[in-house]
Amino acid sequence: MDRAIEIVGSQNKLAAELGIPGPNLSEMRKGKRPCPIGIRARIARIAGHDPTRAILEGLAEKLDPNDEFEGQALTMMKAMVDAFPEEGEPEATKTKKPSSSKATGLDWRNRRDSNPR
């Protein structure tokens, strides 16, 4: 939330952009009031973070780890959140099949052709 406030200019401007009263945003920031999932996603988008990750983290926070079923759901939610790259973390490099004969070490005639004659 601090990053979104920094980008917008002030906490009151952020509250106005979100369409909520300033004191409500202040209470959300202090942890006195829960931040609704939709507001959380919009704040993440403004801050340049992934809104989907923010939604999943918000849902995970609402689950009780001591409850049998909610604990199982929490484990699954954490796995989904961990599947997203961290903010600022470079995405995994994609491996690409080499297409040139120099890269494969094979002569162009020896490569498997997708169009058999």
Image: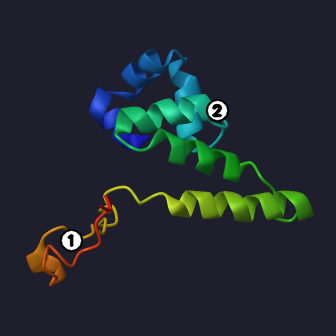
- Which label belongs to residue 98? 1
Q: Position of residue 96 (x, y in %)?
A: 27, 67
Question: Which quadrant of the view contains residue 81?
Answer: bottom right
Q: CA distance from mark 2 to mark 1?
A: 47 Å
Looking at the rendered structure, the kind of residue marked 2 is Pro
Is residue 79 shown left or right of residue 102? right
- Along the viewing direction, whichever of 117 and 48 lies nearer the viewer: 117
Is residue 36 shown left or right of residue 108? right
* Label 2 or label 1, whichever comes before in sequence order: 2
Question: Which quadrant of the view contains residue 38?
Answer: top right
Colouring mode (rainbow / by chain / secondary structure / one colour): rainbow
Residue picked out by circle 2: 36
**Residue appearing at x 41%, y 34% in the figure:** 45
- Along the viewing direction, whichever of 66 and 56 lies nearer the viewer: 56
- Along the viewing direction, whichever of 117 and 19 lies nearer the viewer: 117
Question: Which quadrant of the view contains residue 91?
Answer: bottom left
Residue at the bottom extreme of this rendering = 105
Q: Position of residue 90 (x, y in %)?
A: 29, 62
Residue at the front extreme of this rendering = 117
Total labels: the figure holds: 2
Q: Position of residue 92 (x, y in %)?
A: 34, 66
Is residue 92 shown left or right of residue 43? left
Residue at the left extreme of this rendering = 102
Is residue 82 shown left or right of residue 74? left
For label 1, count other residues whose C-alpha is less than 10 Å away and answer few (under 14), some (14-19) or many (20+). Answer: few
* Residues tagged 2 and 1 counted as in contact (Cβ below 8 A): no
Looking at the rendered structure, the kind of residue marked 1 is Pro
**Residue appearing at x 41%, y 21% in the figure:** 12
Considering the numbered disc 1 on the image, is that residue within a helix, a strand or a loop? loop
**Residue appearing at x 31%, y 65% in the figure:** 94
